[in-house]
Image (tube, helix red, strand yellow):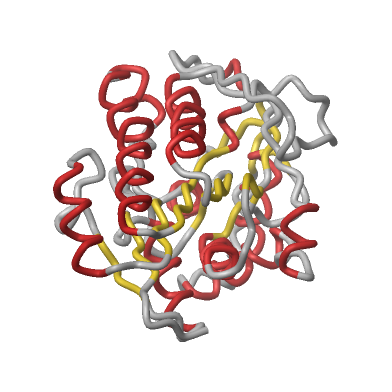
Amino acid sequence: MSSSKPVAILGATGQLGSDIVRAAAAASVEHAALGHDEVDVTDFPSLERAFSRLQPSVVVNSAAFHQVDRCEEDPAEAYRVNAVGALLVARAARTAGARCVYVSTDYVFDGKREAGSAYDEDDPVAPLNVYGASKAAGEQLVAQALEDHLVVRVSSLFGVAGARGKGGNFIETILKKAREGGPLKVVNDQWMTPTSTADAGAAIIRLATGDARGVVHVTNPEQCTWHAFASEAVALAGLTVPVEAVPAATFPSKVRRPRNSALDTGRLSKLLGAPLPRWRDALRAYLAAKGHLN
């Protein structure tokens, strides 16, 4: 799709944002990649200047304060970026005549669903931690500020760029420990839906340039535990270090995490005409791209 008005991508240097930029380029969608150095989502004048110059048709806001532990320590900053920043981006998009796409998280849910079930877009949010609460607030503020909006929820991201501030991602951490000989102990009583940022980026660009509204869950289909995810990565990388399954209580934390935050992707499949690749296939593609395959 080509347009005279670009898609403005905020948070463009992050793990997900960089793959949204790649997806736009691959789809020949005119776009502007805006990192934190170019635009601060908490600075309304900087947003207005950028959008006045670019005249975007769509603004995709993937900028976030997503370090869950640090959000607990600094809730004011979490809300400043994830909630107030989301509101300011939506208002600036409205002023520019653009629609707004806000990237949210599975952590808006409390995780009380039974393992094997998943949350759909209409389920009520009930976050357990500051990060999830700040993102849930961001969702509400975007909807309040701008009728022409879309919220996309992602989960357990893994991408070639790695997460800024986290030094990589879960897979890289696991493989590094495995290559060092272990031991590997991974939680087996928390369920999620892994999300390849390459697959999510492509889906988000298609949704952003289409007419989807409201909320859409954008993850690779099928849920798993962190232990199953880690075990698959270690096996595909050809490593023989055992991965021990342990309960979440093994790792005491000040952050309350949902026991099951798996997201249902039925709506996404209908909008795109097909589901995203299953997480095992997405993981294999990621490992190949990073040079980790055996």
- The picture places residue 1, in percent across and down from the top left corner, at 52, 84
Taking the spot 60% from the left edge, 54% from the top edge, the residue there is 195
Image quarter of the C terminus: bottom right
Q: Nearer the viewer, residue 115 or 38?
A: 38
Q: Determine the image quadrant of residue 96.
A: bottom left
Q: Nearer the viewer, residue 177 or 34?
A: 34
For residue 5, side relative to residue 99 (left or right) = left
Taking the spot 62% from the left edge, 46% from the top edge, the residue there is 214
Q: Nearer the viewer, residue 257 or 12?
A: 12
For residue 123, side relative to residue 91 (left or right) = right
Residue 22 to residue 185: above or below: below
Q: Nearer the viewer, residue 15 or 287?
A: 15
Taking the spot 36% from the left edge, 74% from the top edge, the residue there is 6
- The picture places residue 87, in percent across and down from the top left corner, at 36, 37
- The picture places residue 22, in percent across and down from the top left corner, at 42, 75
- The picture places residue 196, in percent across and down from the top left corner, at 57, 60
Residue 91 to residue 260: above or below: below
How many labels were placed on the picture? 0
Taking the spot 38% from the left edge, 45% from the top edge, the residue there is 90
